[in-house]
Amino acid sequence: MPDLFTRFPALEGAHPLLTGRRIALIGVSVILRDDEGWYFEIQRARYWARRADGTISVGIGGIGGGLHAEEGAVEALRREVREELGVDLILETPPHTVLVHEWRVAGYLDIASEPVSGAYPYIVNLLPPQLGGAETPDALAIVTFLGYPLERPRRGDLFGLLTVAHSALDEFLDSPEWPLEVLQAHPGITLDLAGKLPANCILRPILTARAFRVVMRTDLALT
């Protein structure tokens, strides 16, 4: 896994949680929007979880993925977006860069723009390390941008693409999870699936989409 500060040197020292620590960059993602709405991934079956009561929990994530060896962060993001949605994108400058830690907003970062993209990262999401041992980093990170597709996105190699109309975004983010039948019946939400979802499953924002929910709800509370 690449080092976060190698790919994003402006982040080093920008906050106490980003100072004197080894942080591995496990992914780059984008919160993608256009005039039609906002776009999210519905994860594949191998990532679904079964709760104690037998209900299947299906993750809703951002668009993006991991980095190949020696691949730049923005290069990796553009590749993932082309593979998943068949489009290229413009990276936008967000209102601020937000550091999320333990699913709370830990701070708003004063950093220079990422030199390759010309745009500030939108969210830096710190996650706990998954393994033990001497080589384990202090934290993992997903860096998220804000972007605009150059064409109408279509489901590429995703299992599912979820589109949320602008008018429905606040309602969508207000709930930590959605029953499938409620989501399917919502007039402002569209699901494009490569296969069937389990009956009576629950869909919930995870990773990038969950961090986005945290940021949006915090920003709303501050206004």
Image (spheres, grey):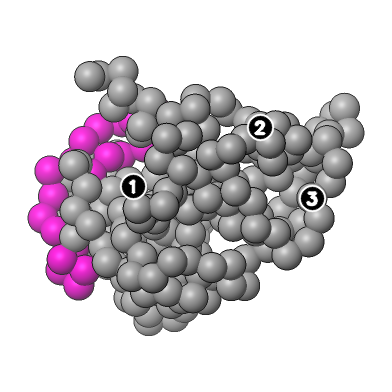
> In the image, what residue occupies the spot 39% across and 70% down?
151
In terms of image quadrants, where is residue 159? Answer: bottom right
> Which of the pair 110/61 is nearer the observer?
61
Say which quadrant the C terminus sits in.
top left
**Residue type, numbered disc 3:** Leu
> Which of the pair 90/124 is nearer the observer?
90
Residue 114 belongs to magenta span: yes
* Residue 197's disc number: 3
Viewer-nearest of labels 1 and 3?
A: 3
The residue under label 1 is 124
Q: Farthest residue toward the right? A: 54
> Which of the pair 38/103 is nearer the observer?
38
The residue under label 2 is 178
Q: Position of residue 116 (x, y in %)?
A: 20, 72
**Residue type, numbered disc 1:** Val
Viewer-nearest of labels 2 and 1?
A: 2
